Image (tube, grey):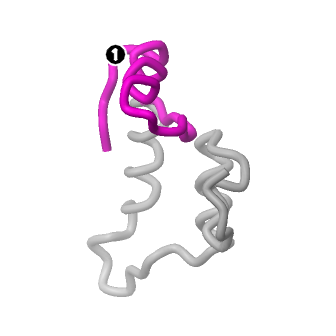
Amino acid sequence: MLFFRSEEAVHEWCRLRGYPLRPLVTIDQLWILATTWYSTRLREDSRRPQPQDMRTIFARVGLKGEFWDPQSDSFG
């Protein structure tokens, strides 16, 4: 995971290195994602979210598209 000051900085970094641009996540989205994903981590019955749970979490955070589908084979 890399952190950048702006979306323009991400575009420049990718361009200079010849990497394709992937979906971006803001710090606010990352915080909500992490606190939701690990909200039950200290419980004895905690388990990793299942694919449908993952889709729900990603949608709640505003992360949409095939890239965020846990059962997709594409990083489009």
Disc 1 marks which residue? Answer: 5
Q: Is residue 76 magenta?
A: no
Judging depth in this view, the residue of 12 and 29 nearest the camera is 12
Question: Residue pushed farthest left?
Answer: 42
Q: Position of residue 54 (x, y in %)?
A: 59, 65
SS for dot 1: loop
User: Residue at left 44%, top 34%?
Assistant: 18
Q: Say which residue appears at 27% left-offset and 72% top-offset.
A: 42
Residue span colored magenta: 1-26
Residue 31 sits in quarter = top left
The foreground one among 53 and 71 is: 71
Say if the magenta span includes residue 24.
yes
Pick whichever, 76 or 42, lies toward us. 76
Question: Can you say whether 52 is above or below 25 in the image?
Answer: below
Q: Can you give x and y, in whole percent of width and height, for residue 3 in the image? A: 30, 30
Image coords of residue 60 (percent x, y): 64, 46
Residue 17, quarter of the rendered image: top left
